[in-house]
């Protein structure tokens, strides 16, 4: 089955060392997850506890950015592949959008404003039907459709967006269905979701807390190295508060996580002997690594001297150990050697063993897709079409299965199917 | 042979093969050079001519599963490398590298959380040793083994999400090549003989272990 669904389907969705790199072995989960703690800008609401096995199980989109109409059935781990500008980051942005709607200081209008308004969000292909609609199903392995949230809205450049549909379903029972009589009586009510209001979301706080727990991470090494990183206009999603997050984690938890990170980093950077934290005179925390050196004592260096790959891997390893909701990772392969990248899927799988944090990844990397344990239902191909980007799960492509049976790696089988049509044109340009 | 041995370059299909080859060479004290992990036999076969050419400059070990691609290892070797090249040692596990793990019966059974009696008598007689490992993992008493090594419904793959990682643990921690030879890994025995020859004379004698 193709993942694109008919319009009425929207209503129907209910439910370099020689040996193997011990990268995944270094990240052994330790015990049960601690109380949830979201760290975002804007801040997520305070959440006391969230069951760790909740995840997005299905997502249906209409007119969202590049996408006309598409649906994805999501496993605990997912890999999005596609050519540049096909919408991989825009797909991740749906989860960030839902987070922003429920975040403290957020809300629907703020989440839209941050994205340039409805007209900037709406797919260019949406000519007749201008409504944007998101249907997210959230559940566990045992009950894939525990919650279902449906949000439709439309708007123009000069007006606040208006909600056309807001529905919450729990276990198949509809517990919120808007617009209702009160909305018709006071249409301004339709500029806010019930999701974002404490006075109206009491019956589905678990859903709200789950959406708030989503974390997007795209570590930008230059921002971590910046001594003014904490006053940066860039949010924590770029890793600007990474070192502070580590510093805030106290005692044995911090030490055991840093020990695992040291072990994992040593795989990629064998010269690293040890990692610790140090506060400078201004109160700013720094992460330090001791490198083996020709001097007998070795040499300590702070994050300002770390390589891009070291910082990226560090950010990734920390995030994988933090408790929380879905983790959205943008091209985790960046700056890393392919031998390290090849082990990332196993690292994700192992990290998920204890705490069940869903991981959704965008990638262009053949090395990352080389892991023979990656399920075809975990890989989604984004292919731009006339009517918007089409999303196809790799398990729906018979030729991909045939290639794998013939001994071809998953990356080699899948990436040419999402490659630009005429890459050779690039080499013909006179610059 | 006196003097320092030249590091051996490894070519292998995947992560499990890599770990097994490295472990074998390490137990025999051979220094290990670059490792080419091809991500499947299709690319390995395509690039074989390059490996053969490069093997003029140093020792290479190339692992390629027999699978169902020939009746026996020598037939596959003759097809893939028709002309002998002294520097290259083409290893053809019969029929997959996993048979070498299965052949270390007691240790592998303990790792999988099964009785040794559950292990196959002659792992090299199996048509698909990898499938046998996955089948056995599905009967494991250990949840991590069952959930990590067996593919989930809808995966469309032959192995589970942690197959490579968990087998890496076993290979590094428990697997013993000599016990595997005693347990019926005949293609591994040929590899070990060849390594012994390399240690003594500095070359692999023939291009293949088959």
Image: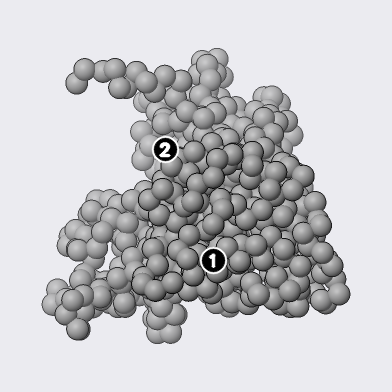
SS for tag 2? helix
Q: Which residue is mark 2?
A: A112
The percent position of residue A310, horizontal first and vertical second, equals 32, 61
Q: Which residue is mark 1?
A: B197
Residue at horizontal 69 percent and vertical 60 percent from the top: B187
> Is residue A112 something that shows in the picture?
yes
The percent position of residue A212, horizontal first and vertical second, equals 50, 56
Q: How many marks?
A: 2
Residue at horizontal 68 percent and vertical 48 percent from the top: B74
Q: Is the residue A392 above or below the residue B184 in the image? A: above
Q: Nearer the viewer, mark 2 or mark 1?
A: 1
The percent position of residue A257, horizontal first and vertical second, equals 43, 75
SS for tag 1? helix
- Left/right placement of residue A340 relative to residue A68 reads left
Residue at horizontal 26 percent and vertical 59 percent from the top: A307
Is there CB contact under 8 Å for labels 2 and 1? no
User: Depth check: A308 or A222 in front?
Assistant: A308
The percent position of residue A291, horizontal first and vertical second, equals 25, 73
């Amino acid at each position: 089955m193709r993942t694109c669904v008919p319009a009425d389907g929207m209503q129907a969705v209910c439910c370099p060392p020689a040996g193997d790199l011990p990268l995944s072995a270094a990240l052994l989960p330790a015990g049960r997850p601690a109380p949830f703690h979201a760290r975002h800008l804007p801040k997520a609401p305070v959440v006391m506890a969230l069951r760790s096995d909740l995840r997005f199980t299905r997502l249906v989109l209409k007119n969202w950015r590049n996408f006309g109409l598409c649906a994805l059935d999501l496993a605990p781990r997912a890999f999005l592949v596609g050519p540049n500008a096909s919408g991989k980051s825009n797909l991740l942005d749906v989860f960030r959008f839902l987070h922003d709607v429920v975040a403290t200081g957020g809300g629907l209008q703020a989440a839209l404003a941050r994205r340039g308004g409805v007209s900037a969000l709406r797919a260019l292909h949406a000519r007749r039907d201008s409504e944007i609609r998101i249907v997210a199903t959230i559940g566990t392995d045992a009950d894939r459709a525990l919650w279902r949230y449906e949000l439709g809205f439309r708007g123009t450049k000069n007006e606040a967006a208006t909600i056309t549909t807001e529905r919450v379903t729990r276990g198949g029972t509809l517990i919120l269905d808007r617009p209702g009589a009160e909305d018709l009586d006071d249409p301004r009510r339709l500029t806010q979701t019930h999701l974002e209001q404490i006075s109206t979301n009491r019956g589905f706080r678990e859903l709200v807390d789950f959406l708030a727990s989503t974390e997007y991470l795209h570590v930008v090494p230059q921002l971590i190295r910046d001594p003014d990183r904490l006053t940066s206009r860039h949010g924590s999603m770029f890793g600007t508060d990474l070192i502070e997050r580590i510093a805030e984690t106290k005692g044995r938890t911090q030490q055991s996580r840093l020990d695992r990170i040291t072990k994992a980093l040593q795989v990629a950077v064998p010269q690293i002997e040890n990692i610790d934290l140090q506060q400078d005179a201004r109160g700013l925390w720094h992460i330090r690594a001791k490198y083996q050196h020709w001097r007998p004592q070795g040499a300590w260096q702070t994050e300002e001297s770390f390589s891009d790959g070291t910082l990226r891997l560090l950010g990734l390893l920390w995030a994988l150990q933090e408790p929380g909701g879905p983790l959205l990772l943008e091209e985790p392969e960046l700056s890393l050697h392919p031998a390290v990248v090849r082990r990332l899927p196993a690292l994700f799988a192992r990290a998920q063993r204890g705490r069940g944090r869903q991981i959704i990844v965008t990638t262009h990397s053949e090395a990352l897709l080389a892991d023979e344990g990656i399920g075809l239902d975990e890989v989604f191909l984004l292919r731009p079409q006339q009517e918007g980007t089409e999303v196809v799960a790799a398990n729906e492509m018979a030729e991909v299965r045939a290639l794998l049976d013939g001994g071809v790696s998953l990356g080699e089988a899948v990436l040419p199917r999402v490659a630009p049509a005429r890459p050779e044109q690039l080499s013909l340009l006179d610059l | 042979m006196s003097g320092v041995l030249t590091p051996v370059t490894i070519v292998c299909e995947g992560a499990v093969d890599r770990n097994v080859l490295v472990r074998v060479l390490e137990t025999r004290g051979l220094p290990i050079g670059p490792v080419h992990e091809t991500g499947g036999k299709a690319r390995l076969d395509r690039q074989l001519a390059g490996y053969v050419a490069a093997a003029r400059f140093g020792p290479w070990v190339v692992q390629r599963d027999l699978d169902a691609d020939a009746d026996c290892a020598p037939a596959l070797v003759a097809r893939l490398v028709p002309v002998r090249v002294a520097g290259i040692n083409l290893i053809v596990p019969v029929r997959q590298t996993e048979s070498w793990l299965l052949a270390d019966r007691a240790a592998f059974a303990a790792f999988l959380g099964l009785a040794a009696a559950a292990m196959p008598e002659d792992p090299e007689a199996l048509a698909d040793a990898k499938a046998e490992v996955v089948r056995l993992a599905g009967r494991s008493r250990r949840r991590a083994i069952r959930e990590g090594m067996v593919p989930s419904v809808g995966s469309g793959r032959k192995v589970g999400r942690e197959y490579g990682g968990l087998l890496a643990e076993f290979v590094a921690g428990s697997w013993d090549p000599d016990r595997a030879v005693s347990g019926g890994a005949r293609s591994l025995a040929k590899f070990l003989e060849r390594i012994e020859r390399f240690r003594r004379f500095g070359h692999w004698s023939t291009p293949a272990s088959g």
